């Protein structure tokens, strides 16, 4: 990631997102600044905080997708939260600190997946050996030994090799049969056989919050009780019969748990959450402005004041340890149809110094969305129907007609941006998707202008679109 320049970051985003050049440039610079900051001496590095961003634009123009692709590109922990889920202190609802706890959980999952991938091959070998021991138990007196190979421990059976011309011993014959069994196991010939394995079984713990299970600032309290209960009553082993295919997955996961160091994962995850984490706060415009209501009710300004310390920089206690939010990048987004960014409280505005407006999508944008991105809808549907033996072909004029229909419906009904393409595409391909896989179903379908017009004629003629469009 440190080698990618802002221009290269924008080029990567262009593979999945059409247009919105200003927003892409802004997030690319923010990401590159993180790499630059890591190269500074510690005393200066701590003084530089990320420049948080507010994205302003209607729904379906790519705000969330830009943030999601950016996090994936940077291999950084990222969560998307909605500002409307949080409430003031003293009310039942989500505590604003829970967004940081969710980020840490995401970081733990991310680092754990990376470390698991590094030892996956070794875990699969351990699982294979355990399955073979169950299918063909070793004879009495034969035990497994451990040796170090390339700095890593490796288990084996200390049985002398067979000498040509001599009769095999009982142990040597068993080892020969074991290798034959290994070949059958790897070929998948034993997948349906049932075996008995020992599985660690933890007692179920259910911790209810206030009002019979509604979570609020009690989110983490429940997990703390659960952890304490697990320490008092550790998992017990329970024998169960499963198919060999399922046993391989269960035993591989057990081996992974024993091979990876959770303490090391936790330390790295906390560091990555603090230094590289991204929190995307959607619908921030819904909490902008002062509340017009009076009385005992949650005020929008109160929610902003609760979010403010998190964005400013504070320490949040999680079950894995304290996390500082000073260097987490916050990206806020909202349509701001009714309110505007200046309606946020001044302190919160000051913590989002960068603002960019995302433009609404028109016909030409829809045409590019259907043609250019790596994950374009046309490619998705072509691949989906290919699994049923149906060859789907989109002509240039067919794609143009779909784009024009989506733009027309957005003008006539609610403008939901590129999400309208999903609705229109489903309507166009409804018959093909329904009949695909049937003995007499279609094998080759050409989606041209006439085909699209025929499928969408009711929508294009009828002004009451609620009957046809979600």
Image (cartoon, grey):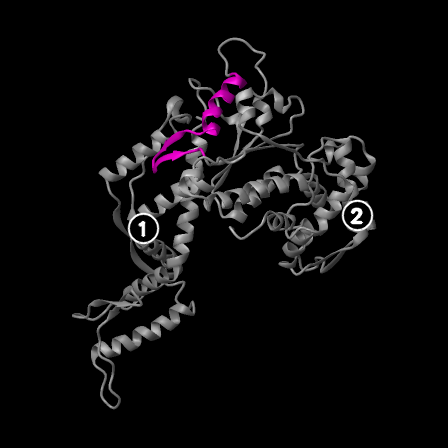
Residue 261, which numbered label? 1
Q: Position of residue 204 (x, y in %)?
A: 32, 38
Badge 2 vs badge 1, beta-carbon distance below 8 Å? no
**Total residue callouts:** 2
Name the residue rendered at 39%, 53% in the picture.
115
2 or 1: tag closer to the N-terminus: 1
Q: In this view, does 347 lie to the left or right of 431?
A: left
Name the residue rendered at 54%, 9% in the picture.
294
How far is mark 2 from mark 1, CA to CA?
A: 54 Å
- Between 256 and 46, the residue placed more toward the observer is 46
Q: What stretch is highlighted in magenta?
A: 299-326
Crowding near pointer 1: few (<14 within 10 Å), some, many (20+)? few
Q: Assign the C terminus to one quadrant of the image.
A: top right
Name the residue rendered at 48%, 24% in the picture.
308
Q: Position of residue 323 (x, y in %)?
A: 38, 35
Q: Can residue 434 be seen in this view?
A: no
Name the residue rendered at 56%, 44% in the picture.
70
Q: Is residue 285 left or right of residue 264?
A: right
Q: In this view, does 210 lie to the left or right of 398?
A: left
Q: Where is residue 149 in the image (x, y as percent from the top left)?
A: 29, 68
Indicate the quadrant where residue 411 lies.
top right
Asked whether 307 falls inside the magenta stretch, the response is yes
Q: Mark 2 points at which residue?
A: 400
Q: What element carries label 2?
A: helix
Residue found at the far left of this picture: 141
- Between 20 and 52, the residue placed more toward the observer is 52
- Between 11 and 155, the residue placed more toward the observer is 11
Q: What element carries label 1?
A: loop
Q: Can residue 251 be seen in this view?
A: yes
Label 2 vs label 1, nearer the camera: 1
């Amino acid at each position: 990631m440190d080698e990618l320049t802002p221009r290269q970051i924008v080029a990567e985003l262009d593979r999945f997102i059409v247009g919105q050049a200003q927003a892409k440039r802004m997030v690319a610079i923010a990401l590159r600044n993180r790499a630059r900051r890591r190269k500074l001496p510690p005393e200066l590095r701590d003084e530089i905080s990320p420049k948080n961003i507010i994205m302003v634009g209607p729904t379906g123009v790519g705000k969330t997708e830009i943030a999601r692709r950016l996090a994936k590109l940077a291999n950084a922990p990222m969560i998307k939260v909605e500002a409307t889920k949080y409430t003031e202190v003293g009310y039942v609802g989500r505590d604003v600190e829970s967004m940081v706890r969710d980020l840490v959980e995401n970081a733990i999952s991310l680092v754990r997946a990376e470390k698991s991938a590094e030892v996956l091959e070794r875990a699969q070998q351990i699982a294979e050996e355990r399955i073979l021991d169950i299918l063909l138990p070793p004879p009495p007196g034969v035990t497994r030994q451990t040796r170090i190979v390339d700095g890593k421990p490796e288990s084996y059976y200390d049985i002398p090799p067979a000498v040509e011309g001599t009769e095999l011993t009982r142990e040597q014959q068993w080892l020969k049969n074991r290798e034959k069994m290994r070949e059958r196991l790897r070929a998948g010939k034993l997948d349906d056989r049932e075996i008995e394995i020992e599985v660690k079984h933890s007692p179920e713990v259910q911790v209810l919050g206030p009002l019979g299970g509604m979570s609020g600032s009690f989110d983490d309290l429940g997990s703390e009780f659960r952890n304490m209960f697990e320490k008092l009553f550790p998992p017990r082993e329970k024998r169960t019969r499963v198919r060999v295919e399922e046993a391989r997955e269960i035993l591989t996961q057990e081996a992974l748990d024993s091979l990876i160091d959770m303490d090391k994962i936790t330390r790295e995850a906390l560091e990555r959450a603090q230094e590289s984490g991204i929190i995307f706060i959607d619908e921030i415009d819904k909490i902008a402005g002062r509340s017009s209501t009076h009385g005992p009710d949650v005020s929008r300004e109160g929610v902003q004041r609760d979010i403010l310390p998190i964005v400013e920089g504070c320490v949040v206690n999680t079950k894995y340890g304290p996390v500082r939010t000073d260097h987490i990048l916050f990206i806020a987004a909202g349509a701001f149809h009714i309110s505007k960014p200046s309606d946020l409280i001044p302190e919160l505005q000051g913590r989002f110094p960068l603002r960019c407006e995302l433009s609404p999508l028109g016909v030409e944008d829809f045409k590019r969305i259907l043609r250019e991105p790596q994950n374009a809808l046309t490619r998705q549907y072509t691949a989906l129907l290919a699994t049923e033996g149906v060859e789907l072909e989109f002509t240039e004029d067919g794609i143009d007609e779909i784009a024009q229909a989506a733009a027309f419906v957005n003008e006539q009904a609610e403008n939901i941006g590129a999400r309208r393409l999903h609705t229109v595409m489903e309507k166009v391909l409804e018959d093909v998707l329904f009949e695909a896989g049937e003995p007499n179903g279609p094998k080759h379908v050409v989606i041209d202008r006439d085909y699209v017009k025929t499928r969408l004629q009711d929508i294009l003629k009828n002004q009451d679109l609620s009957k046809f469009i979600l």
